Image (spheres, grey):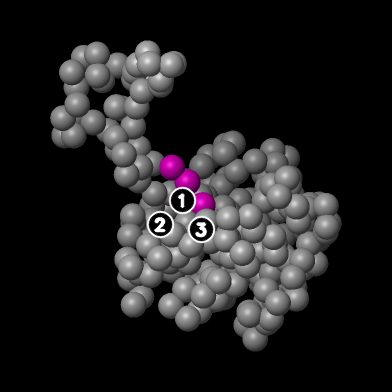
Amino acid sequence: MNDLAVIPARAGSTRLKDKNIHLLHGIPLIRWITKAVVDSQRFSKILISTDSDEIFSNVSDLDVVRHIRPDHLATTQSTVLDAMMDIMDNSKEYNTFSYFLPTCPFISAEDIKQGYELLHSADTVISMTEFSDTVQLACLLNGTNVMPVFDNLEKGITNSKYLKKFYKPSGAFYMGQWKHLQKHRNFFIGNIQGVCIPKERSVDINDINDIKFAEAISPYK
């Protein structure tokens, strides 16, 4: 096993103060995903990439190692992907690279194991979830002018049994072959596989309303 996992958790948060350590059912948010990654037993090293001593202290008892996130990659302007590529560029080479967001608390070790198995025959594996809205009914508004994006409305095809299901990244995890990511620096190029996360576990925490919603629907009450 020669696989690196990273959990990025910077201190700054504009919509929810101290988001990564905000309590959900009495458990700091970062601990939910960290515990799932550790319990999956699929990674030879798990990094907590953070600029905060307090964030790391909430998971330091688990089998993880702290990575000091550089200041220039801990701002609101820096992207998670930029920070992850920086870690790859400054690490020894592993077989695979994966990162997991602490804002998605209901991801299980079994979800992670499923993704890891798919990675054996894929370039990348991404957690996915079904769109809750009917994408084919989407419209653009230019002032008061309505412009359908798809042709379903023009053709009167609006019955759900005739509409395809659409999916989007759930945000929980991104896995990839090390050499593939080093070359393309993107998880959406090549042979991409997906692990579908049920809607009830596809919560992504951004603000206090998301915390309240997560507590209300939590499968782990």
Q: Earlier in the sequence, mark 2 or mark 3?
A: 2
Q: Which residues are magenta?
A: 168-172
The residue that label 1 is drawn on is 170
Q: Amino acid under label 1?
A: Ser
Q: Residue at label 3?
A: 207
Q: Position of residue 40 (x, y in %)?
A: 51, 72
Residue at x 24%, y 13% (from the top left corner): 154
- Residue closer to the observer: 43 or 149: 149
Task: Give yes or no for contact between labels 2 and 1 (Cβ–Cβ under 8 Å).
Answer: yes
Three-letter code for the amino acid on which mark 3 is drawn: Asp
Label 3, secondary structure: give it.
Answer: loop
Residue sitting at the far bottom = 61
Residue at numbered disc 2: 202
Relative side of 105 to 47, left or right = left
Residue at position x 33%, y 55% in the image: 199
Query: Foreground residue, 71 or 115?
Result: 71
Q: Quadrant of the N terminus?
A: bottom right
Labels 1 & 3 near each other (Cβ < 8 A) = no
Predominant SS along the magenta part: strand
- Other residues around mark 2 within 10 Å, as few (<14) / some (14–19) / many (≥20): many
Asked if residue 132 lies left or right of residue 43, the reply is: left
18 sits left or right of 121 in the view: right
User: Is 197 or 50 nearer to us in this picture?
Assistant: 50
Residue 41 in sight:
no
* Residue 177 included in the magenta stretch of the image: no
